Image (cartoon, grey):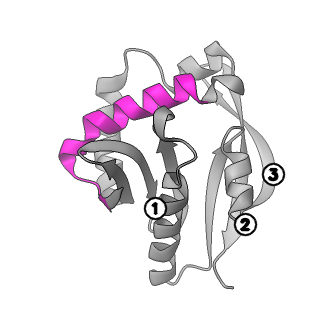
Amino acid sequence: MKIRRFQDEDINQIVNLFYDTVHSVNKKDYTIKQLNVWAPPGEQVTIRERWRESMHRNITLVALVGETIVGFSDMTINGHLDRLYIHKDYLKQGIATALVHNLENEARKLKLAEIDTEASITAKPFFERKDYKVIHKQSVERSGILLTNYIMIKSLLS
């Protein structure tokens, strides 16, 4: 596995990975209606354009096996870990750990005291194992549907 910075040509694989992951990995914790507002069918083009811009603004890393993107994650320069998605066929192989570790190192280089994220029900145990602490549970409304996630923070001062 290789980790590198986001490049424009990555966007199609990233959006496809996002859709596949949400609709397969997260289905154990969310309903079909919730999954469809999280990753709406037929909106890939809109998401590609919006994400391409934010991924250039953020520190965005992709994990590759050969030429295939098997995971990606990004963080704002203020330390908000925005997205972390791993290909459904590459779970539990250390990819998420490697991506988050690299982003935490980037946050330390920026002299940030902490990093925060909004973890899904599915991702919460992963972040807890990485020393992120739940600040509170929240419900986020999208198109009239509520999605539960967790505001989590990790101190980088240790």
Q: Foreground: 118 or 22? A: 22
Q: Residue at x 51, y 84 (%)?
A: 111
Residue at position x 68%, y 68% in the image: 154
The numbered mark, 3 or 2, whose residue comes first in the sequence reads 2
Query: Does residue 78 appear anywhere in the picture?
Result: no
Q: Nearer the viewer, mark 3 or mark 2?
A: 2
x and y, in percent, of residue 25 in the image: 59, 30
Do the residues under discs 2 and 1 have CB atoms within 8 angstroms?
no
Residue corresponding to mark 2:
131
Q: Quadrant of residue 67?
A: top left
117 relative position to 71: left or right:
right
Region rendered in magenta: 4-25
Q: Which mark is residue 136?
A: 3
Is residue 17 on the magenta stretch?
Answer: yes
Q: Calculate the distance from the C-alpha at mark 2 to the C-alpha at mark 1.
A: 20 Å
Q: Quadrant of residue 127?
A: bottom right
